[in-house]
Image: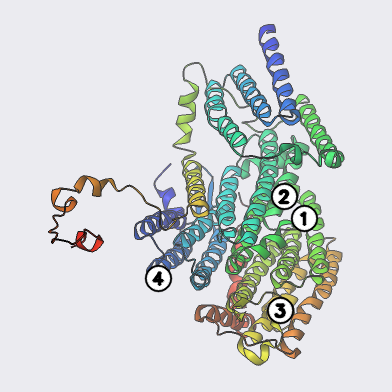
Amino acid sequence: MPLQAIAFYLMAAVTIAAGLGVVSARNPVHSVLFLITAFFSAAGLFVLLGAEFLAMLLVVVYVGAVAVLFLFVVMMLDIDFAALKQGFARYMPIGLVVAGVLVLEMIFVTVSVANGGKAGPGATPQASGVDISNVETIGRVLYTDYAYFFEAAGMVLLVAMIGAIVLTLRHKPGVKRQNIGAQVARGPKTGMTIVDIGSGASVDEGSLNQ
Amino acid sequence: MPLSDLQLAAPELILALSAMVLLLWGAFAGRASTAHTVASMAALLAAAVAAVYAPHGRAFAGGFVSDDAATFAKVAIFVASAVSIPLATGWFARRGDSRFEFPVLVILAALGMGMMVSAGDLISLYVGVELQSLALYVLAAFRRDDPKASEAGLKYFVLGALSSGLLLYGASLIYGFAGSTHFDVIAAAVGDGVGKSGVLFGMVFLICGIAFKVSAAPFHMWTPDVYEGAPTPVVGFFAAAPKLAAMVLFARALADGFAGALDQWRQVLIIIALLSVFVGAFAGLAQSNLKRLWAYSSIANVGYALIGLASGDQAGIQSMLMFMVLYMVDVTGFFACLTALSREGKPMETIQDMAGLFKEKPGMALAMTAFSLSALGLPPFSGFFAKLYVFKAAVFAPNMAWVAVAGLVGSVVAAFYYLRLIKVMWFDAASGPVEATPTEARVIAIGAAVFSMPLVWLALHWLDQWAGAAAAAFGHS
């Protein structure tokens, strides 16, 4: 299908260009914006594969939450990104070697797949059929076959939550906090003191606390 | 998912539920208490008992395996985790920094380790590894006001994330070529030889990722820094249970999933094992900090365990299990000693700090001597039997006798630093009085030392049987 092919090449090209932009942009905010572009085009690729639910998740979770969070962090932290890139030229050769190895692997994988080098019954995962939606397909396995993994992932998130609290929460002594319960419960009896002041005496802390 | 699946996962359920209950208890009480600590230890021990009685089989659509190997590893892991709790809570309490999250995180790490040794699927493998690692990152940085501990936690986290990336990349290649994340389907695909080169490519990445978790060279860079910076009792926990869990995971993935590619993974494991043995031996020579020294020692010891695993047959896996369990006792005992000892308010962490320890604290000095000689592999100690198993398995495996010889050479080199420590403890002059040692650390250290020297002769008989049964459970997926 030519239309699909055009859409695929367009979105694939945008993804790669945006990916290059992420690592080459001078301004970190631009990097994050490039990242969002890459996520969007990757979501488009998912739609082409018939996995519209994954595409939606990619947009909602990665674009909506993660990337915006990145943007906040980048803007709020005063990091000197120019200094971070100091060693760029020095580490360039080793980076190129690693990138070269990864490119070779990708070529190898593509060639093997093209030669029919896949095996096993599930080698070509199918998008859900016509009669049921993506969400339903995932829902059918997520809480049955994959219940164990799902619950385990929940435990991982629990650890992350405990970790964040353990490492950052501090109870500072001497901080004044609003106690709404005490404020509401305050009535004329507790909020007012009638002090009998003798002639010539003054109102001081001692007489108020009687 | 039939309800009987839950029975198989009873140890994990106990841990998960008790972690949540203990978390709520701590949050409402607002502080750590002795009852809380004891309850968390009881939860771990209950899980160990449940592991013994859990029925065998596969649960959750093959994602969870309960067999003799899982039982063996879980009992060792949960008991080691339970032992580390009083050691650490006592240490934190003496520094006025006791928090109720510590036992909860240890339980969650133990839960992750239980999932790792029961993994029957790449997804449960990964989730187990992540659960365990995340808890360990937090434990490494638990003393957040100590810059070294924060550095250790951050370094561990960043490098751990990198290794998870490697592991996931490998897993995705395996999934792509084998068509499934289940170890049995992968094993079938490897056996058919279809798409084998792609699966093997993924396997090498998977090995790299797990090698990072067991801190085998060349993926060991994080170990000395993390051991040096993290709180001492936490290091004692790091060096014992998670290593065993990752080694059993290694055996699970390779012997269950890649039985048909034994020759290929054996090559990779031999390279990693010998590199670890020699890096551990030679780099350890230059260390003066005991925590760093034992980090290199643990790298070398993981190398020996990997030699056992590389043998690939049942005797090889059995030797690996024996080696790791006996090593766990030594390393826990050694770090219990380090936790206990301080001089003029400062923890004794360098070799020179140990000068004259024998005159001050003969019991501690004897225990540390026993652990050092055992890690060195001297005959009457447990470490000797551990190495004996490994080298025996290697000698009988085809074309692996030279690996055993190389391993022996490495252990001769490493003998130098263990003997130097012993010499300093026994013959050098003390620089000041050693403070009184806390009871719980003393009890754990002496107990481990007694196990390492006479008790192991009795225990060896049963350990051999259990490890043999555990090793027989592999390769039947």
Give the amino acid at mark 4. Thr
Badge nearest the viewer, 4 or 1: 4
At 61% across and 88% down in the image, what residue appears?
B363
The Cα atoms of the two marked residues, 4 and 1, are separated by 44 Å
Q: From the viewer's perspective, tell me whether residue B170 is left or right of residue A60.
A: right
Instruction: Looking at the image, tell me whether mark 4 or mark 1 is earlier in sequence order.
Output: 4
Query: Mark 2, chain letter?
Result: B
The Cα atoms of the two marked residues, 3 and 1, are separated by 26 Å
Determine which of the numbered discs, if any, sits on residue B372 in the image: 3
Give the amino acid at mark 1. Leu
Q: Which residue is mark 4?
A: B34
Q: Which residue is mark 1?
A: B269
Q: Are marks 4 and 1 in contact (CB under 8 Å)?
A: no
Instruction: Looking at the image, tell me whether mark 3 or mark 4 is earlier in sequence order.
Output: 4
Instruction: Looking at the image, tell me whether mark 3 or mark 2 is earlier in sequence order.
Output: 2
Badge nearest the viewer, 3 or 4: 4
Q: Which residue is mark 2?
A: B207
**Residue B427 image position (x, y, % from top left):** 75, 90
Classify mark 3: residues with Cα within 10 Å, few (<14), some (14-19) or many (20+). Answer: many
Give the amino acid at mark 2. Ile
